[in-house]
Image (cartoon, coloured by chain):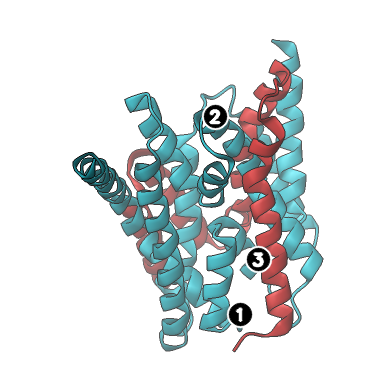
């Protein structure tokens, strides 16, 4: 049921993830950072999140691109659940139609 | 004495319940995402127990989607672990932001808070702390544990249902993931000028995705954005 190689990968993932979770606290407890570093770090979560979803902006399929535009517009105005539903529904419908 | 303890524990219970109530709408939003993740993972050949194990030990959806995206017959260990680190490097900043709120806590409680920290639990916990000028541990654990169990259970369910659903792209399920990230990005939108590193990151990531194999687009995009952010921070 659990492949040994898969288990090794999962343990590797979990190890680095826990490190990122406790690392900020462990390193910064009782220290001060330069304002420039703090300002740079402010942009980091957004830079990472948007890079992760970049492939969705480059599929080249018109149905996918249009669905993504609709999802972006929904995400600007709506909470999580309706945005997810609109994103999924628009992709499902547009892939049938286009 | 007994009376006081009972009163304290009932106050604690109501804080836990308040946490569960606060996270419920987010959990509903994650239902299709977690199901889609489980189904995608099963299409790539992962079993339901492997999905439970991954979501239970790693508990960071973005990196799990990225890992599944890179999954092959023999998945590349170093690449997946490196991308997991890159995708989750934002936790370093999130943990740093939580640090002042953890100041008075015993070390093990602070680590318990951090181990359960994901985008959603972090955002809810900080927003609640700002509103009440107090970081409520039972509120935090109420919502964070709900998210943890929900994510694990729903993605496992997705893995079990995946083979019955066939190709889940026909339901648009793969759009669930960018939809969640876009809503999270909207929540942290810092204004056009400060968001320009995001756009640089996106542009370079798209170019790298089209030009290079593997997942180099994540580090190349993110580092470009951070470089621009560093330059901009130096000018002010």
Tell me the distance, in whole angstroms, between the alpha carbons under discs 1 and 2: 43 Å
Q: Secondary structure at mark 3?
A: helix
Q: Are marks 3 and 1 on the same chain?
A: yes
Visual hue assigned to chain A: red
Is residue A48 in view from this perspective? no
Tell me the distance, in whole angstroms, between the alpha carbons under discs 3 and 1: 11 Å
Point out residue B171 in the picture as x, y percentages from the top left corner.
40, 72
Of B104 and B92, which appears nearest the observer? Answer: B104
Report the chain holding disc 2: B
Q: Earlier in the sequence, mark 3 or mark 1?
A: 1
Q: Earlier in the sequence, mark 1 or mark 2?
A: 1
Q: Secondary structure at mark 1?
A: loop
- Whether residue B146 sits left or right of residue B174 in the image: it is left
Q: Give the residue pinned by disc 3.
A: B67
In this picture, is B62 found above or below A98?
Answer: above
Mark 3 and mark 1 residues within 8 Å of each other at the beta carbon: no
Tally of numbered discs? 3
Q: Give the residue pinned by disc 2.
A: B103
Instruction: Say which chain is cyan.
Output: B
Of A64 and A25, which appears nearest the observer? Answer: A25
Q: Residue at x 51, y 55 (%)?
A: A65
Mark 1 and mark 2 residues within 8 Å of each other at the beta carbon: no
In this picture, is B100 found above or below B51?
Answer: above
Give the quadrant of residue A38.
top right
- Whether residue B120 sits left or right of residue B21 in the image: it is right
Crowding at dot 3, Cα within 10 Å, few <14 / some 14-19 / many 20+, comes out as: many
Is residue B170 in view from this perspective? yes
Q: Give the residue pinned by disc 1.
A: B44
Locate the C terminus of chain B by quadrant: top right
Q: Residue at x 69, y 50 (%)?
A: A19
Point out residue B73 in the picture as x, y percentages from the top left corner.
72, 83
């Amino acid at each position: 049921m659990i492949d040994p190689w898969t288990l090794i990968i999962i343990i590797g993932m979990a190890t680095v993830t826990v490190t990122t979770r406790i690392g900020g606290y462990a390193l910064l407890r009782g220290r001060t950072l330069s304002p420039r570093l703090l300002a740079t770090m402010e942009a980091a979560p957004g830079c990472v999140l948007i890079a992760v979803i970049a492939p969705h902006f480059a599929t080249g399929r018109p149905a996918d691109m249009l669905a993504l535009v609709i999802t972006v517009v929904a995400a600007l105005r709506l909470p999580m659940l309706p945005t997810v539903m609109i994103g999924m529904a628009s992709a499902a419908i547009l892939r049938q139609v286009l | 004495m007994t009376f006081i303890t009972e009163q304290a524990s009932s106050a604690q219970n109501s804080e836990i319940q308040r946490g569960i109530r606060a996270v419920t709408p987010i959990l509903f939003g994650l239902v299709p995402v977690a199901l889609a993740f489980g189904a995608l993972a099963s299409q790539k050949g992962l079993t339901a127990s492997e999905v439970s194990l991954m979501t239970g030990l790693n508990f960071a959806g973005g990196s799990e989607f990225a890992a599944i995206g890179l999954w092959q017959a023999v998945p590349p260990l170093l690449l997946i672990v490196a991308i997991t680190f890159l995708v989750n490097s934002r936790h370093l900043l999130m943990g740093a932001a939580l640090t002042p709120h953890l100041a008075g806590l015993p070390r093990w409680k602070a680590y318990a808070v951090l181990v359960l920290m994901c985008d959603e639990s972090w955002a809810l916990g900080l927003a609640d702390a700002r509103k009440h000028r107090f970081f409520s541990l039972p509120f935090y654990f109420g919502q964070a544990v709900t998210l943890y169990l929900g994510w694990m259970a729903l993605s496992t369910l997705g893995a079990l249902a995946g083979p019955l659903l066939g190709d889940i792209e026909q339901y648009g399920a793969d759009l669930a993931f960018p939809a969640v990230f876009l809503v999270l990005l909207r929540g942290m939108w810092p204004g056009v000028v400060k968001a320009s590193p995001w756009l640089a990151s996106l542009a370079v990531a798209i170019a790298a995705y089209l030009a290079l194999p593997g997942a180099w687009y994540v580090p190349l995009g993110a580092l470009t954005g951070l470089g621009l952010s560093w330059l901009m921070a130096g000018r002010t």
